[in-house]
Amino acid sequence: MSLAIIGIAEVPTKRDPERTRWDMLSDVCMGAIRDAGIDKDDIEAVISVNPMAQAQMALDMALGRVPEVLGLKGCKDICVLNSGGTSTTNCLRLAKYFIDNGQAKFVLIPHTTVQSDIPTEDLINFFATAPLDPQWEYPYGVTFNGAMGLITNRYMHDTGATAEQMASVTVTLRGWGALDPNSIFYGKPVTLEDVLESRMISTPLHAKECNFLADGAGAMVVTSHEIAQELGRPAAYELGHGVRFTGATPVLREDPYFIKAYRESSQDALTEADLSIDDMDLRQIYGAYPFTQCSALEGYGVCEFGEAAAIWAEGRCGPGGDLPCTSMGDATGRGHTGSGVSMAFYLDTVRQLRGEAGERQVSDCNHALITTSGGSVMNACTTIFGSAPR
């Protein structure tokens, strides 16, 4: 047996502190259950994405409030998982264990976050201390943007990528976001000049190449391949999975661009799925910063090292391109909702495989590769999904 995503729901990413965490959570959970075509009491486990920097909500989820508030009378167990941006991936991995071992037929995976009611200084400190070493990096004034700026600078030096080519990644991601009603940047594309003329945050990263923190929520209902087929509803079927750890501290990594991790995790996933990278109709890359969109393609073997920035600059990875990538826009093209931003990658993958992505729909999308990463890209978790089981 394996995992199938049969129900999804999402609220638009935005900054709106009047939308409460519980209101959004209730909307997406019940929406995903309705989309799955099951009764709420069919849910036998709730595995939640930990809401970063929101201690009370994290505690509520960890202590069982979700099934109680939603009235999930069939729920047998709950859990909250935290591995930064790979939290959603690990929720899916635990759900698969529950399903494969007969502990649950249907598992609900929710995420909610509100960052607009958290003081800006607190958010800056949280996202600076969370992914960086408190002894060797943070005391010297390094923020998340600072660390990623240093890595981007080295990547550009080693590959010869230009500022214009790197900025084109953001232009493309915002192009996807401009077509997505769930993106905070819906209807707001940017030009190359817009990106390059935005203020410098940490050389060579401009403001529009960095993340915009926002609020959002999403949920999935998952089950086995067999049950998904019995229900006869469109689903996204997991076909293969692979993972590699790169290291928690950026300054200590031997593979600063994560190319080895992208390569090995994707090879494991593709081998399990009995597919090749050329069989992928869509590549979903969660790296939160533009250079990762390039280094991932190089790691997957789509192109040689140093060639990816030019591919993005040519428009091949955007809407209508022959190599569509990251159709949900990543955190720079959609808004960053904390550890749950990876939830949006899975929801978008399901829409693409079900042919429900609207203006962003990738034609004949039958296989998709999705890689998520946590912390300051401490790992690479790659999964292959298909519109049909093997």
Image (cartoon, grey):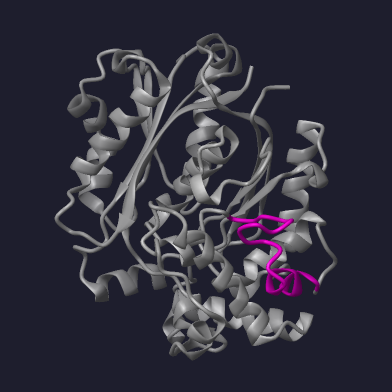
Instruction: Measuring from the top left, give residue 369's x and y in whole percent.
Output: 67, 44
Please say whether residue 342 is one of the residues in the magenta stretch: no
Instruction: Measuring from the top left, give residue 340's x and y in whole percent.
Output: 41, 50
Instruction: Measuring from the top left, give residue 351's x and y in whole percent.
Output: 52, 38
Number of on-image labels: 0
| Residue occupying the far right of the picture | 304
Please say whether residue 309 is one of the residues in the magenta stretch: yes
Please say if 163 is above or below 80: below
In which quadrant is the N terminus drawn?
top right
Residue numbers of the magenta segment: 307-326
In which quadrant is the C terminus drawn?
top right
Judge whether residue 257 can be spotted in this image.
no
Please say if 27 is above or below 57: above
114 left or right of 308 in image: left
> In percent of the image, x 28 and y 45: which residue is there?
58
| Main SS category, magenta section | loop
The front one of 334 and 244 is 334
Instruction: Measuring from the top left, give residue 122's x and y in whole percent.
Output: 26, 71
